[in-house]
Amino acid sequence: MARNETILGFDPGKDKCGIAVIDGNRAILHHEVLLTAQTIAQIRTLCPQYNVSRIVMGDQTTSKQWKQQLTIAFPDLQISLVDERYSSLEARDRYWQMYPANFFTTLIPQGMRQPPRPIDDIVAIILIERYLAKSGKDNS
């Protein structure tokens, strides 16, 4: 990953989608879960705001339709598909790293804890990390 390359991660879904933006230093600049109907408009806002050069998205649920839509809406952006299998499980663990549990929640084994909100945005972060690892562009 070029030092100045900013990537938008996208976890497509039927009802809701996750979006994350990570810069060339692997700093998370933005992440959110939004309704599917809001996705294109929000990506249209985020791309110029963060100078996004690539969209990385999961390759499973609704990915073919989304890739077509994104290619039409953002013809100048590169779109890369990555394997999203088990990313939701990984995102659940990552949620607890990003937002440590309070004392009472820690009494529940981590494998049994459910995050209190959708984690599609954290899946989008993981998709970017998988892209970087697979493409040999991992700076860490």
Image: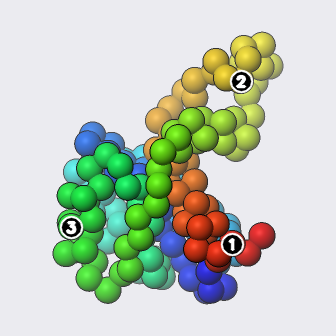
Identify the residue at horizontal 46%, vertical 60% (top origin).
82
Nearer mark to the viewer, of 2 and 1: 1
Q: Which amino acid, by three-letter code, is at mark 2?
A: Gln
Q: Amino acid at mark 1?
A: Asp
Q: Are marks 2 and 1 in contact (CB under 8 Å)?
A: no
The answer to which quarter of the image holds residue 49 is bottom left
- Which of the two residues, 50 or 130, is positioned nearer the viewer here? 130
Q: Which residue is mark 1?
A: 138
Say whether residue 77 is visible: yes
Measured in 3D between alpha carbons, the distance from the residue under mark 3 to the one under mark 1, in whole angstroms, is 27 Å
Q: CA distance from mark 2 to mark 3?
A: 38 Å
Colouring rule applied to residues? rainbow
Cα distance in 3D space between marks 2 and 1? 28 Å
> What SS does tag 1 mark?
loop
Is residue 4 shown above or below 79? Answer: below
Mark closest to the chain's N terminus, 2 or 1: 2
Across and down, in percent, residue 4 comes to: 61, 86
**Which image quadrant is residue 43 in?**
bottom left
Q: Is residue 119 left or right of residue 37?
A: right
User: Which residue is identified by label 2?
Assistant: 110
Left or right of 21? Residue 106 is: right
Dot 1: within a 10 Å radius of its alpha carbon, few (fewer than 14), some, or many (20 or more) residues?
A: some
